[in-house]
Amino acid sequence: MITTKEASLRLGLTERTIRNYCSKGRLKCEKRGKIWYIEESSLDDVLEVKVVGTEETERKIGTEYDEPSSKSLALPPYYLLVRENGYLKAQVDIFKNQIEELKNRIKLLEEQLTYQKTSWIKRLFKR
């Protein structure tokens, strides 16, 4: 399960659009409180194949596979790069938040350690 931010980065859409897709059932989502969590497997269902030309000359953008698959068209290479880039940006944001939380925890533990050291010294000299 991923957040709306991660999904929006992967698909190149806004977070608002992702939330709309969740509420309309276009994505497999679960709402916990105010936050939507999206199943990663449902992201492929949102991808749309664009059709170019009139009905006579209409062709699909992309390269067709010879063997049948869940998607009949290959995605353009740049789309895959954009998608991967979005995923990596989301991962970096997650790691930055985790690092910040760990720094705060270290600072709190150092403060507790300092307090314990000073209280021990104070008790020693009270006698």
Image (cartoon, rainbow, N blue to C red):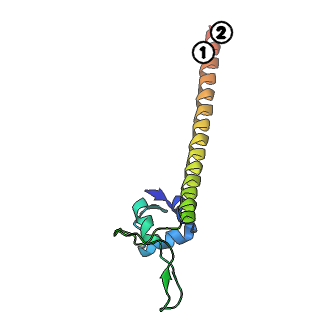
In the image, what residue type sits under mark 2?
Answer: Phe
Residue type at mark 1: give it.
Trp
| Residue at far left of view | 68
- Asked whether 92 or 120 is in front, the reply is 92
Residue position for label 2: 125
Whole-percent x, y for residue 89 in the image: 59, 54
Considering depth in this image, is 62 or 100 the residue closer to the camera? 62
In the picture as drawn, the residue positioned furthest to the top comes out as 127
Q: CA distance from mark 1 to mark 2?
A: 9 Å
Q: Secondary structure at mark 1?
A: helix
The residue lying at 56 percent from left, 70 percent from top is: 16
Counting residues from the start of the chain, the first of labels 1 and 2 encountered is 1
Evaluate whether residue 8 shows in this view.
no
Quadrant in which the C terminus appears: top right
Q: Position of residue 45 (x, y in %)?
A: 42, 70
Q: Which residue is mark 1?
A: 120
The residue lying at 63 percent from left, 23 percent from top is: 114
For label 1, the crowd category at 10 Å Cα-Cα, with few meaning under 14, some 14 to 19 and many 20 or more, is few
Looking at the image, is 31 positioned above or below residue 116?
below
One can see residue 86 in this view: yes
Element class at badge 2: helix
51 or 25, nearer to the observer:
51
Label pair 1/2, CB-CB below 8 angstroms: no
